[in-house]
Amino acid sequence: MTVYKRGGVYWYAFKWKSKRIQKSARTGNKQVARQIEAAHKTKLAKAEVGLDDARPAKEAPRFDEAMKAFLKWSAEFHKSKPATTRSYKTRSAALLAYFKQTKLDEIEPADVESFIEWREKQKRKAPARLLKKNPKAKTDKPIQPATINRELACLRAVFSYHIRKGVKLSNPVSQVRFLKENEDTFYVLSCEEEEKYLAECSVPLYDVAVIMLETGMRPNEVYRMERRHLHLEESYYFVPSGKTKAARRRIPLTERAKELLKEKLEEVEGQWVFPSPDNPKKPITKVNNAHYGALKRTKLPRFRIYDLRHTFATRAAEAGIDLVTLAALLGHSKLEMVLKYAHPTESHQKEAIKKFELYTRRVNGREQSQNF
């Protein structure tokens, strides 16, 4: 038996019919790990002689075939959320380049870790504007941990899909630790920066940006705003769909947001508040190019359009909105998520310390007066 420790837990590895089996025992107890390894061997032996009660398993497909079937299923299952399938398709590129035609049951945790190492050595693609001028354009920027983690999540989803379909295999991604992401990349706009940014925004970027700054909505939620869910008289917008129950919510509208949306409804026709210029029967998909164009003109620090949501959350927290209410406004089911979005500025922290100092002086002064 080969049992070894990695990252605080024991793993086991052995060969079965010339195939290497490697799994995490998910325990820090060596003896228990050996028992788990023995149980795994027993299960394999029972299956070989027909004592396994499980239904006959489907043959594991090649990775390229598995990904194709998964993306086809995703397009149908997430029909109302096409962005989900688009993101899976984007993430599949690196996975297909690495695993190619490897059969699913031959991919082990060690192979997934090798994929991570391979990906970390690669460089990010050049922006589309540079690729148009030079298709061979490259950058020196490394692939971000967040990008690799999203690709791992896609790989995990592919395995989960085929396991549900009856392919007998384990999900190797579940035994691999994801990379630590840099959570300090959020950017919060000051009021002066907001004014400069909006002054250079074209339409519909300007409208999208204002709504995000006033409501904290996700970009995709703004893009897919529907006329029927907009209730200006009651001052709210209803988000009908989302990944969680908390994401489906009523969002109160500020006067600034209401006035903008009222004018918008007078300008457009049909279902969507932000219809696509190419096909009014569909909503816009993104305004990233216009966003980065505005940043270039203003010479502001580079930030993502999603950071307008972070800006709303930070301002709301500084205004005194409690975290439970803020979580509901943002569509989060856990308070931990709100803490990632709300980033009190340095000036706000200084003001908080001044308030604390005045409070302690007042309390100490009262106590001293009581002693006399």
Image (spheres, helix red, strand yellow):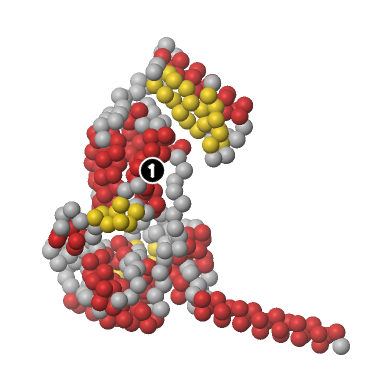
Q: Nearer the viewer, residue 98 or 68?
A: 98
Q: Nearer the viewer, residue 182 or 271?
A: 182
Q: Position of residue 328 (x, y in %)?
A: 46, 64
Q: Crowdedness of circle 1 by 10 Å Cα count: few (<14), some, many (20+)? A: some
Q: Nearer the viewer, residue 93 or 325?
A: 93
| Badge 1 amino acid | Ile
Q: Position of residue 213 (x, y in %)?
A: 36, 74
Q: Is residue 56 above or below residue 119?
A: above
Q: Which of the 4 image quarters holds residue 193?
A: bottom left
- Toward the right, the furthest residue is 372
If the image is split into quadrants, where does the N terminus sit? top right
The answer to whether 92 appears left or right of 365 in the picture is left
Q: Nearer the viewer, residue 197 or 87?
A: 197
Q: Is residue 107 visible?
A: yes
Q: Is residue 298 above or below residue 170?
A: below
User: Mark 1: which secondary structure?
Assistant: helix
Residue hosting label 1: 116
Q: Is residue 173 above or below residue 200?
A: above
Going 37% across and 54% down the picture, which residue do you hit?
144
Going 87% across and 88% down the picture, which residue do you hit?
372
- Toward the front, the furthest residue is 140
Q: Position of residue 72 (x, y in %)?
A: 23, 41
Q: Which of the 4 image quarters holds residue 58?
A: top left
Going 24% across and 34% down the picture, which residue do you hit?
65
Q: Is residue 88 visible?
A: no
